[in-house]
Amino acid sequence: MQTEPRDPPRVVLLMGPTAAGKTALAVKLIECLPLEIVSVDSAMVYRRMDIGTAKPTPELLRRAPHRLIDIRDPWERYSAAEFAADAAAAIEEIHAAGRHALLVGGTMLYFRALMEGLSPLPAADPAVRARLEREAARDGWPALHRRLAALDPAAAARIHPNDPQRIQRALEVARLTGTPISELQAAAGEKYPARYLKLVAAPTDRAVLHRRIERRFDEMLAAGLLREVAGLKQDPRMNRGLPSMRAVGYRQAWHHLEGTYDSSEMRARAIAATRQLAKRQLTWLRGVDGADWLDPTADGADGALERAVERFLC
């Protein structure tokens, strides 16, 4: 007996740069619509990393549970492929319960992995990464970016010279496969079949976002970010080369605690790195087809967002 093909789930994506106010918008949405939040954040997946990730407080999580938060220890790795599988499973559970998934965050690679699938890239190789770390310590990441530009101009054009994680990954893939990462990424893998409402929350005025970034980092420092990083640093399983410690804020705090630079420079570097992250996020978001943009700081933004989601779910 043939079964009727089911309608694909309707999934709401609330994307945006860091510090744009996505969590507050998401909480307001779930209070009035049949939605459940799935976090799309590569740092919030880690336990013991609460302050520097701007993770929702326990009180807020009781009001508005988030899936895919606190699912790894900070010395573990978590890939975009793992996220895509975990997010798909979460969407299926939410859909089966008669509700809709609201994916909220700013890790654009995770959104792409879910919506478009992933290219067939090799797994990380600790030995290759260690060699690249040593080369970067000797020559600097901008020098490695220049090497990448010679090997893979297309990838280098997309990757900022001060983005060590992506530079390292692109060079690692080239060394492991002999093929530029840009070529491999052109062969996309399986995507999750859903109907997506793509929403982008971003202040229209870039200066507003910059002020929010600066204010939020100062709040993190006041809340004890350095104590949090010091506690992680004391764990023998931790080192500053781990993906968790490459997150903005954590990387700069670790270097400060090692004595690389003073607290003033640490703050300036962390804010600058967060602004660069926001810029990369916005660049990616401008290329998302069919996305609706809203300014969360504008009058009536909450109501407009609620109406757009309600129309999509009906």
Image (cartoon, grey):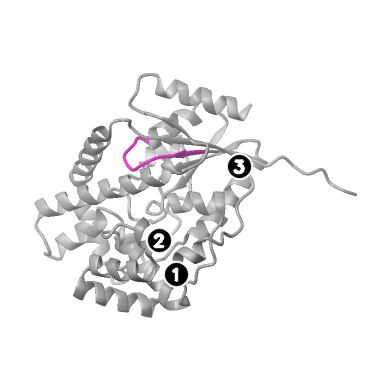
Viewer-nearest of discs 3 and 1: 1
Considering the whole magenta stretch, tell me its main secondary structure: loop
Residue located at (23% from left, 34% from top): 207
Examine the rendering and report whether any part of residue 52 can be seen.
Answer: no
> Residue 257 location in percent, x, y?
15, 62
Which amino acid, by three-letter code, is at mark 2?
Answer: Ala
Q: Is residue 294 above or below residue 109?
A: above
Instruction: Tell me if label 3 and label 1 are in contact, CB under 8 Å.
Output: no
Instruction: Tell me if label 1 and label 2 are in contact, CB under 8 Å.
Output: yes
Does dot 1 land on a helix, a strand or a loop? Answer: loop
> Residue 147 location in percent, x, y?
30, 71
Does dot 2 land on a helix, a strand or a loop? Answer: helix
For the image, the number of numbered tags is 3
In which image quadrant can residue 156 be found?
A: bottom left
Q: Which residues are magenta?
A: 13-21
Which amino acid, by three-letter code, is at mark 1?
Answer: Pro
- Front-most of residues 221 and 2: 2
Q: Is residue 66 above or below residue 250?
A: above
In which image quadrant can residue 43 be found?
A: bottom left
Q: Residue beneath label 1, please?
A: 180
